[in-house]
Image: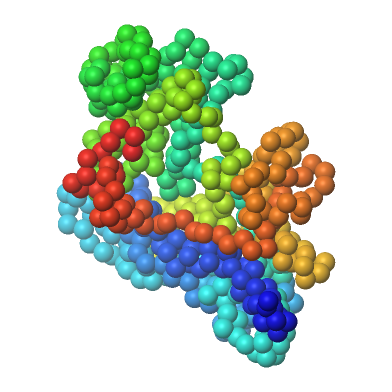
Amino acid sequence: MIDTETRRVISREYFSRERLAEHHFRSFNAFLDTGMQQVVDEKETIDTDIGDKEGEEPVYVELGDVRVVTPRVREADGSEELLYPQEARLRNITYSAPVFMEMAVVVGGEETEEEVVDQTETKVGRMPIMIGSDKCNIANFDDQDLIDIGEDPADPGGYFIVNGSERVLMTSEDLAPNKILAETDTKYGDDVQVAKTFSQRRGYRALVLVERTRDGLLEVSFPSVSGSVDFVTLVRALGLESDEEIVHRVSEDPEIVKFMLENLEAADVQTTEGAIETLGERVASGQGKNYQLKRANYVIDRYLLPHLHEEGVEEEDVRINKAYYLCRMAEACFELALGRREADDKDHYANKRLKVSGDLMRDLFRTALNKLARDVKYQLERANMRNRQLSVSTVVRSDVLTERLEHPIATGNWVGGRSGVSQLVDRTDYMGVLSHLRRLRSPLSRSQPHFEARDLHATQWGRICPSETPEGPNCGLVKNFAQAMELSKTVEDERGLKRELAEMGVQGIPGIEGVERPADD
């Protein structure tokens, strides 16, 4: 038996302020440490239209390292001092820190020698800082220090202060990206099977569907192509040309092979070139032949399964990987039709992922950086037209980024058309605050029944509280973490993980040298 004193120590440690909002801290700290830099590296440069005219040298801006300091406030006399949360609440200001980025204006292109006209680290805006995160000014204060500056030592943190209001970002529940889910399409009865995947890369999310129709033929739907494309035509366009290779990559099962032979007989094209021409007629009908081919290649590289793009991997290998992935999706459709597998359960927690504060802030920062890039482009072009000196400090307007970061947190209206992502912290009592920080919401509509999504699921045991959910239209869609729940984080370095698995003897990992790609990678 555990004695009373030991029980008290365990309880005190369990309900410590570091632990109850830990998932928010860990996520936001990861965003500040690596997430922001990754978004900047994705952007890499800001291109301009300078140089389009004859005789003009091209100009672009190169982006470098980004860093965030701790929260500061600029006073009326121009001085800048440290800002503490209680002061931000009382003065109705935002608890935010300056963001600095290395930027360089480069003149010249591939034809001419490039010259760096101006290179400096400049302030690009302000980032709202989470109370209690690594960049917070009170992060390492002890209880007495917190009391001295007017803070409650028991306050768990994990929220932001924008215009004096305390705002918490709601953890969002979503279907797992880059994972094949097979199900029967109930709209058309039990004889239409669908395999789908939400392919996600760098904030872009594309829904790819492989559907087995009533007559047994496979069709693929993906963004930027109206309607659906014949499966065999698409995999041939990706580089799988021979009938034998297509069938082998889908399955060796005799019954599935029979289904595939029906699809091959119905196919109109037999070569990769012919398949790309057919696709070009679909995506750019009425245009010239060269434009159709260019557009078809762009569409399958840009919009079809974008998550399979990897840095340093040849385009041909990426296309073959896409063909293998589509074959795996086709096999899932056939297995479902033959009763070899059950339909995937969308409510199973293995098929879900949670977006915490850091993930939400990354989406926001990506949009804000794009807005800043457009503004810098405009300012550079205007300065060039007026024959002014091109310098970083004069073309960067810091309020552009600041506004794009603060306004969504203040209103709750997030990128992608989502609303209610940030909410006022429930300060009814201490337990109300803890409950609010550990709440998660589903993206499903409150006005629809969604009976299965609202039900308790066996996989929620130990993860989601079975009783704490609101009454009324939000019932079962707004949930809360269980007391002992710990949230694991996504592996950022997928390539490093794949290489470790390969070294341990796992075979068939795509993108790793010396390892053969299998049909069901």
Instruction: State which quadrant residue 82 falls in.
Output: bottom right
Whole-percent x, y for residue 5 in the image: 70, 84
Residue shown at the point (49%, 75%) measured from the top left:
69
Residue placed at 61% from the left, 74% from the top? 18
**Residue at 45% from the left image edge and 61% from the top image edge:** 35
Vertical placement of residue 98 versus 306, above or below: below
Colouring style:
rainbow
Depicted 44 relative to depicted 163: above or below:
above
Q: Is residue 19 left or right of residue 366?
A: right
Q: Give the quadrant of residue 261.
A: top left
Question: x and y percent of residue 353 in the render?
Answer: 54, 49
Residue 486 in sight in this render: yes
Residue 201 position in % (x across, y down): 42, 45
Please state the horizontal and vertical placement of residue 153, each as a whole percent of the image.
69, 82
Q: Quadrant of the C terminus?
A: top left
Image quarter of the N terminus: bottom right
Whether 75 is drawn above or below 491: the answer is: below
